[in-house]
Image (cartoon, coloured by chain):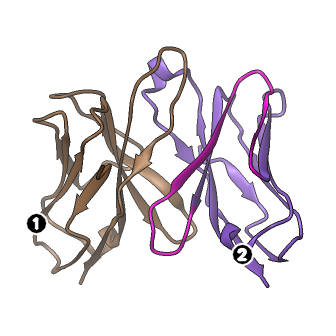
Amino acid sequence: NAGVTQTPKFRVLKTGQSMTLLCAQDMNHEYMYWYRQDPGMGLRLIHYSVGEGTTAKGEVPDGYNVSRLKKQNFLLGLESAAPSQTSVYFCASSYPRTGQNTEAFFGQGTRLTVV
Amino acid sequence: QQPVQSPQAVILREGEDAVINCSSSKALYSVHWYRQKHGEAPVFLMILLKGGEQKGHDKISASFNEKKQQSSLYLTASQLSYSGTYFCGTANNAGGTSYGKLTFGQGTILTVHP
């Protein structure tokens, strides 16, 4: 049981380049999220999706785009990378339960450096 | 707004106890606790829902005081394996309207020495 898988695990980009981070989950979860983690800042929500074909902005969406064409996949795109986007990116998924919040399952993270 | 965790860091010897606090300026529906080891993904510990319940998991327990908008994580008789960064994540609405979105605190680094 793989859970949540992120690719790639590491990447170095030059300023202005673009890239896509892939997140795949095999738990049939409806909800998926992209967070970024910076030292001393905890995890901050970039974008999220509540089902196939839906996306919504989180706390820090600027400079990122997302797509969820298939239920199991959630893609995060950087159109023109900036050094401020140097971070560790985590994908997570969870399942909805009426009236409750449920645990999120996280991927192993992607360490992105923009030079 | 991000919840505030205290302390920022704590160092223990095996067998000692610790308390990590999480405070929010907003009304809370639930508080989630995660532990993250260096270079790894955050791992779920427990959820506390509105109602002031207290939960336990082995020697790790937590409480939720919704009136004070605070949660505390209690680590009893700490083990080396408890080392890591602990995050609280807060939700202001029930699952159906918050869609599981969490606002995380900045983290508390816990180090347990032999």
Which is nearer the eye, B97 or A91? A91
Point out the residue furthest to the front here: A1
Residue at 77% in and 34% down? B69
| Residue that carries the numbered disc 2 in the rendered image | B80
Residue A28 shown left or right of residue B22 in the figure? left
Residue type at mark 1?
Answer: Ser
Position above or below: A50 against A93: above
Question: What segment carries the magenta color?
Answer: B36-58
SS state under label 1: loop
SS state under label 2: helix
| Quarter assignment of residue A14 | bottom left
Query: Do the dots labelled 1 and 2 sit on one chain?
Result: no
Viewer can see residue B72: no
Q: Position of residue B62 (x, y in %)?
A: 78, 43
| Residue that carries the numbered disc 1 in the rendered image | A18
Q: Read off the chain for label 2.
A: B
Q: Residues within 10 Å of mark 2 (few under 14, many from 20)?
A: some
* Colour purple belongs to chain: B
How many angstroms separate mark 1 from mark 2 (CA)? 41 Å
Q: Position of residue A3 (x, y in %)?
A: 32, 49
Q: In the rendered image of this protein, which colour is used for chain A?
A: brown
